[in-house]
Amino acid sequence: KAGVTQTPRYLIKTRGQQVTLSCSPISGHRSVSWYQQTPGQGLQFLFEYFSETQRNKGNFPGRFSGRQFSNSRSEMNVSTLELGDSALYLCASSLDRGANNEQFFGPGTRLTVL
Amino acid sequence: GQQLNQSPQSMFIQEGEDVSMNCTSSSIFNTWLWYKQDPGEGPVLLIALYKAGELTSNGRLTAQFGITRKDSFLNISASIPSDVGIYFCAGQLRGSQGNLIFGKGTKLSVKP
């Protein structure tokens, strides 16, 4: 079974631009979560989608948004990029069945904002 | 926000040594997960724990879900060079689907 895939793997943008990142979950997984990883703050939760609905949201500004499609694929968008948005963005998928909360991560998208 | 205190921050290992790391929190979690991350890659799930007191092994790795539900530890026995990397604990609060709270990580390096 293929793992979680993320595209693109690397991205360079300038301040003020916007960016869209894509995530394809493991087949059969309906929950997709997004995280931002930086050296200073570590791994921080952005939001989680299940059946095309945002179920949970972290403490990030409204410039960070996401969506999920009917095939469970998910995208996240960051508008008006700031230098501090440079980070590794990780997507994780989960079966989310009963007590099973195991999340499996993709390789991430490395975003650099200049 | 919620925080997990993970210790130690870093440690040096010599091949064959046993390694221990732990995470504590002021909050009660219903799930504890342990991940390993290598440079340039996403975290890889090592062990998942769902019940207080649960002790689970995965090869040379053993992890426990604390009785108070506020802590967890991970042990690596007879370490080998490929064990180097960053280990993260992560916890999920009841009712907080898809939202894992991560520790800051324990970096394992090889003794020079």
Image (cartoon, coloured by chain):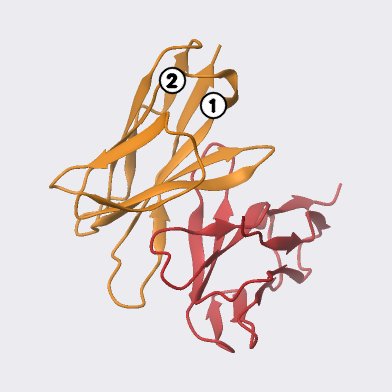
Chain colours: A orange, B red
Observer-nearest of A112 and B75: A112
Asked if residue B57 lies left or right of residue B83, the reply is: left
Q: Quadrant of the N terminus of chain A?
A: bottom left
Q: Is residue A78 visible?
A: yes
Q: Disc 1 is attached to a residue of which chain?
A: A
Identify the element where label 2 is drawn: strand
The residue indicated by pointer 2 is A11
Left or right position of A14 against A70: right
Three-letter amino acid code at disc 2?
Answer: Leu
Question: Which residue is more in the foreground, B111 or A100?
Answer: A100
Q: Which residue is under mark 1?
A: A85
Q: Residue furthest front?
A: A62
- Classify 10 Å Cα crowding around label 2: few (below 14), some (14-19), many (20 and above): some
Q: Chain of mark 2?
A: A
Residue B55 in which image quadrant: bottom right
User: Are discs 1 and 2 both within one chain?
Assistant: yes
Percent of width and height locating residue A104: 39, 56
Neighbours of disc 1 within 10 Å: few (<14), some (14-19), many (20+)? some
In this rendered view, identify the residue nearer to me: B108 or B27: B27
Comes first in the chain, label 1 or label 2: 2
